[in-house]
Amino acid sequence: QTRPDPNANPIKADGSDQVVVLPFASLQSPNDLPTGWSHKTFWFKPAMQLSLVDQQGTRAMRCETDAGGSILFRSTDIALADYPILSWDWFIEQPIDSNVDERTEAGDDHPARLFFMFSDSQSDPHYLEIIWSNKLFEPGEYKYIGDFPHYVANGHDENTGKWQHQQVDLLEIYHTVTKRDDTPTLTRIGIFCDSDNTGSASIAYFSDVALMRDQ
């Protein structure tokens, strides 16, 4: 059986004020993904369990982990120069409960992340994540594991149990972490939940994720 091409059928801009890059509300099943979606799993680690549910009246992707993790992503072809603002809502039901330092590789688990892959003006790839911090980081801070960048958008137990609306300038974050001044193309975006390093568990929800013009 031929494996689906993860780069096929990318979401492109249609000239509107926003592009829904992770359209969970229109996804029929996480177990039968249409072309352009891919669920990346890791050797010897249980994948996050995915289901489409209504969470407090909002259609959402539910992501549950138990000492594991994986990434559900969608291929895209969108210039951040045109759509630099990222907007989304997430809901943390079960945060990471661990005393392992999240600044270290051993403690590098988060109940919810957004994963990004960009192609710069020389067609070289760049990666970053936007994360929900466990305890140690505040919104607007950056976390690095080695040279891999993470932007902290929210976090901490007191913010769990309710929908949190987020909006960031993704182009500005890209410029900060890459130290480049070009305008890249977003080629992949995904949700990533993991609890494998700490051996803990997590439950998170994501509604539709969109890129918007800078108003």
Image (tube, helix red, strand yellow):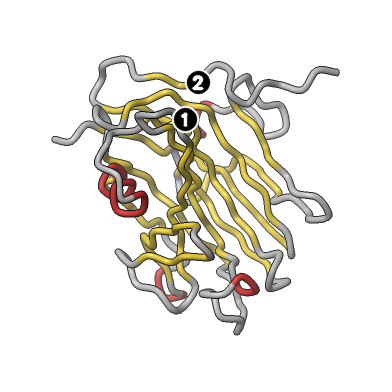
Q: Position of residue 96 (x, y in %)?
A: 59, 71
In what quadrant of the picture does the C terminus appear? top left
Q: What is the total number of numbered labels drawn onto the structure image?
A: 2
Looking at numbered disc 2 in the image, what kind of residue is underneath it?
A: Pro
Residue located 60% across and 84% down the image:
99
Residue located 68% across and 73% down the image:
198
Q: Which mark is residue 187?
A: 1
User: Mark 1 falls on what kind of element?
Assistant: strand
Toward the bottom, the furthest residue is 99
Looking at numbered disc 1 in the image, what kind of residue is underneath it?
A: Thr
In the rendered image, the vertical position of residue 193 relative to residue 211, given as above or below: below
Q: Position of residue 149 (x, y in %)?
A: 44, 57
The answer to whether residue 167 is visible is no
Q: Is residue 47 found left or right of 97 in the rendered image?
A: right
Q: Nearer the viewer, residue 128 or 193?
A: 128
* Picture quadrant where residue 209 is located: top left
The answer to whether residue 147 is visible is yes
In the rendered image, the vertical position of residue 88 relative to residue 146, given as above or below: above
Crowd class of label 2 (few under 14; some 14 to 19; many from 20; radius 10 Å): some
In what quadrant of the picture does the N terminus appear? top right
